[in-house]
Image: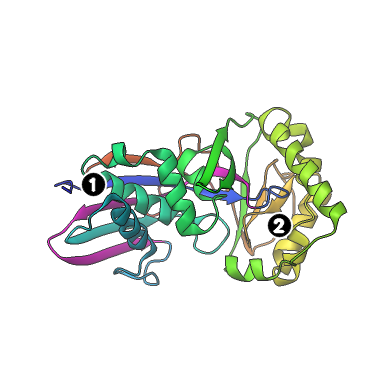
């Protein structure tokens, strides 16, 4: 297999999964982006990281982007002699905003773009299946790849998803704490079974949430009620739980973003709402395009680790 002689680049959005009752199924792409570029090298692997995770993330084959690229090259049939990868990260690490899914989707798309005829040999549904297989679930990789509001599910043949347009009145705000969380730790807090009534209530609210996000945002507060995961995770994230409860008491459709500890508000908080100094508050647009691939190296603006998408 031949490889591209020049570099390729990709922009991938942050995501918020679950959205309350849509556990492991619903996700939303947000206008905060990581920019990455890659090219084939004569030998070895070199990764540079600026912005979020700089000085912490691996700079070799252990980096998640490279691991996703390697998995993709295996599917496509050949590994390059070496790789140079540049990452400009703006999505906070381990905060419930899809940083790992962004890295995986970016890696799959970069490898596909570097492979001769890669786009023909691996279409978008195949990209989704591979990314979900690497991540373990499709709820974040789907909105990262497709953009917008996504419904994702798994079949014996792999992950599938659809993307829906969001009503104009939905204006997400994220509250990002300094502390980090781990998805594995959050999942370990979940019980093996839940009461039938809780499952039935949450299923109904998930269905209502699809309608509220796409057609009637006035229903977002009742549509974001969840009894499957947030209460079980609350003891491990007391600050997150307290903020979600306070926002909801003020009439704001607030949920835990992914596995936390970030809080997502789907309706605007009151201007005088007392958040405190422990949270960074970002108003983010909904990303409607999903991951975008282009030829060439990163430009000056793309290399700015705070330039893309965020409003404080």
Residue identified by numbered label 1 = 115
Task: Determine the secondary structure under disc 2.
Answer: loop
Q: Position of residue 237 (x, y in %)?
A: 70, 68
Q: Is residue 135 left or right of residue 224?
A: left
Q: Who's the residue at 83% across and 47% down the image? A: 201
Q: Is residue 29 magenta?
A: yes
Q: Is residue 88 magenta?
A: no
The residue nearer to you, when weighing 305 against 226, is 226
Query: In this rendering, which labeled residue sits more in front, label 2 or label 1?
Result: 1
Look at the picture and state if 162 lies above or below 202.
above
Residue 137 visible in rendering:
yes
Alpha carbon separation for disc pair 2 and 1: 48 Å
State which quadrant residue 293 falls in: top left
Q: Which residues are magenta?
A: 24-51
Task: Determine the secondary structure under disc 1.
Answer: loop
Q: Position of residue 160 (x, y in %)?
A: 53, 42
Look at the picture and state if 72 lies above or below 150.
below
Q: Is residue 239 left or right of residue 290?
A: right
Q: Is residue 88 left or right of residue 177?
A: left
């Amino acid at each position: 297999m031949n490889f591209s002689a020049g570099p390729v680049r990709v922009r991938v959005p942050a995501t918020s999964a679950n959205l309350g009752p849509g556990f492991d199924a619903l996700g939303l792409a947000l206008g905060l982006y990581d920019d990455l570029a890659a090219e084939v090298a004569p030998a070895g692997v070199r990764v540079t990281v600026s912005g979020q995770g700089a000085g912490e993330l691996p700079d070799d084959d252990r980096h998640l982007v490279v691991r996703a690229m390697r998995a993709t090259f295996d599917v496509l049939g050949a590994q390059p002699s070496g790789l140079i990868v540049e990452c400009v990260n703006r999505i906070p690490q381990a905060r419930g905003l899809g940083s790992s899914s962004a890295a995986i989707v970016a890696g799959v798309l970069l490898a596909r773009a570097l492979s001769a005829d890669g786009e023909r040999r691996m279409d978008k549904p195949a990209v989704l299946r591979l990314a979900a297989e690497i991540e373990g679930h499709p709820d974040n990789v789907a909105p990262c790849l497709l953009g917008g509001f996504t419904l994702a599910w798994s079949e014996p043949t792999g992950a599938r998803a659809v993307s829906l347009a969001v009503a104009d009145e939905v204006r997400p705000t994220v509250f990002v704490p300094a502390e980090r969380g781990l998805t594995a730790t959050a999942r370990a807090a979940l019980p093996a079974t839940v009461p039938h009534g809780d499952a039935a209530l949450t299923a109904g609210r998930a269905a209502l949430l699809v309608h509220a996000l796409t057609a009637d945002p006035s229903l977002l507060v009742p549509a974001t009620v969840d009894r499957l995961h947030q209460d079980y995770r609350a003891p491990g994230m007391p600050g997150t739980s307290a903020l979600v409860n306070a926002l909801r008491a003020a009439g704001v459709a607030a949920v835990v973003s992914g596995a936390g500890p970030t809080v997502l508000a789907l309706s605007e908080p009151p201007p005088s709402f007392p958040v405190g100094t422990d949270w960074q508050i970002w108003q983010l647009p909904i990303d409607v395009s999903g991951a975008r691939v282009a030829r060439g190296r990163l430009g000056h603006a793309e290399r700015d680790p705070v330039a893309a998408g965020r409003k404080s």
